[in-house]
């Protein structure tokens, strides 16, 4: 019998489908957007930085045949230090497990922050398949490798202690990010991430991201696949790389802390990045116009 990892008991209740209704009721506003595949990662449930409200909105407006949870869905690092689990985080789990009950294939690939789930690779909890990595065949015949991506992070591999220091600093930035978001919402301004903007301005961060993308794409090319889908670095991106004369597609599905992005595959195999705050911003004027017409 597999021995439970230390502290896993804190998260055991998420493996079973909740019998109660969610705190935020599931919305059925018209027809949901239908996709062949959805990839999301770096949700960081269990932290104040998680944009639960936007992710709940995304889950209530989209559906797919398959959904990949590409790591760092639960932030075990932070939960070990201080348990934080508001009702909205349970609502996200409820919605994902409900998708599984409706027939959506859910594949969960744990990352470094939810590494306590990795020993359960190959098992199924509440209709959620746990895999160390996966391969996905697109509708247009391409084969993609799907993994969280911390395997290619040199800091994680060589200096794990430094990764924990960086995590503490990162969450301090997330607290500031939450304060800024609250103030902007108060004044009716759209969501904007100060940490995401800062990361794109810092030269070393830009160089690290670029190098990381090259390393991951090269690894995919060496494995003979057509592309790779990953998360980990909280930077949504679609890029093409050349490996031995063959094009290799690099897809990063971003995060739900800073960018609030999802990667989606349409039924013809086309892959697109969605920035959900933009989707919400486009929707709100239309809703306001409909209310005025009805008045």
Image (cartoon, rainbow, N blue to C red):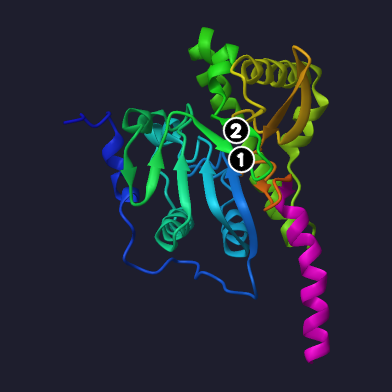
**Which residue lies under the disc numbered 2?**
172
**Which residue lies under the disc numbered 1?**
175
Pick the front one: 23 or 136: 136
Q: Residue furthest left?
A: 1
User: Which residue occupies 53% across, 43% down?
Assistant: 68
Pick the front one: 177 or 257: 257
* Other residues around mark 1 within 10 Å, as few (<14) / some (14–19) / many (≥20): some
Looking at the rendered image, the quarter that the C terminus falls into is: bottom right
What secondary structure is marked by label 1? helix
Q: Which residues are magenta?
A: 273-295
Left or right: 132, with 156 as reference point: left
Left or right: 149, with 242 as reference point: left
Q: CA distance from mark 2 to mark 1?
A: 5 Å
Pick the front one: 60 or 34: 34
Residue 206 falls in image quadrant: top right
Prevailing secondary structure class for the magenta stretch in the rendered image = helix
User: Which residue occupies 52% across, 11% down?
Assistant: 157
Q: Position of residue 244 (x, y in %)?
A: 75, 11
Q: Position of residue 223 (x, y in %)?
A: 59, 17
* Label 2–label 1 contact, CB within 8 A: yes
Q: Residue furthest top?
A: 158
User: Does the rendering let one see residue 14?
Assistant: yes
What secondary structure is marked by label 2? helix
Q: Specify whether residue 111 is painted magenta.
A: no
Q: Specify whether residue 288 is painted magenta.
A: yes
How many numbered callouts? 2
Q: Position of residue 253 (x, y in %)?
A: 65, 38
Q: Position of residue 92 (x, y in %)?
A: 48, 55
Looking at the rendered image, the quarter that the N terminus falls into is: top left
């Amino acid at each position: 019998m597999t021995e439970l990892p230390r502290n896993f008991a804190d998260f055991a209740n998420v493996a079973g489908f909740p019998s109660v209704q969610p705190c935020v009721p599931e919305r059925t506003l018209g027809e949901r957007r239908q996709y062949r595949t959805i990839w999301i990662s770096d949700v960081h449930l269990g932290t104040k930085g998680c944009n639960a409200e936007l992710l709940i909105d995304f889950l209530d407006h989209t559906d797919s045949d398959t959904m990949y949870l590409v790591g760092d869905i639960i932030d075990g690092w932070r939960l070990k230090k201080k348990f934080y689990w508001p009702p909205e985080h349970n609502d996200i789990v409820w919605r994902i497990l409900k998708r599984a009950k409706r027939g959506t294939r859910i594949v969960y690939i744990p990352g470094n922050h939810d590494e306590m789930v990795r020993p359960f690779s190959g098992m199924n909890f509440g209709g959620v398949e746990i895999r160390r990595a996966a391969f996905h065949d697109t509708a247009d015949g391409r084969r993609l490798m799907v993994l969280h991506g911390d395997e290619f992070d040199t800091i994680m591999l060589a200096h794990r202690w430094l990764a924990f220091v960086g995590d503490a600093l990162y969450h301090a930035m997330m607290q500031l990010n939450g304060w800024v978001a609250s103030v902007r919402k108060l004044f009716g301004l759209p969501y904007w991430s100060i940490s995401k903007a800062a990361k794109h301005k810092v030269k070393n961060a830009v160089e690290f991201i670029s190098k990381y993308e090259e390393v991951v794409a090269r690894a995919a090319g060496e494995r003979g696949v057509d592309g790779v889908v990953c998360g980990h670095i909280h930077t949504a991106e679609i890029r093409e790389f050349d490996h031995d004369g063959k094009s290799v597609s690099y897809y990063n599905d971003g995060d739900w802390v800073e960018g609030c992005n999802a990667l989606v595959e349409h039924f013809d195999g086309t892959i697109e990045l969605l920035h959900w705050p933009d989707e919400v911003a486009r929707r709100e004027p239309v809703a306001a116009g409909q209310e005025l017409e009805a008045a």
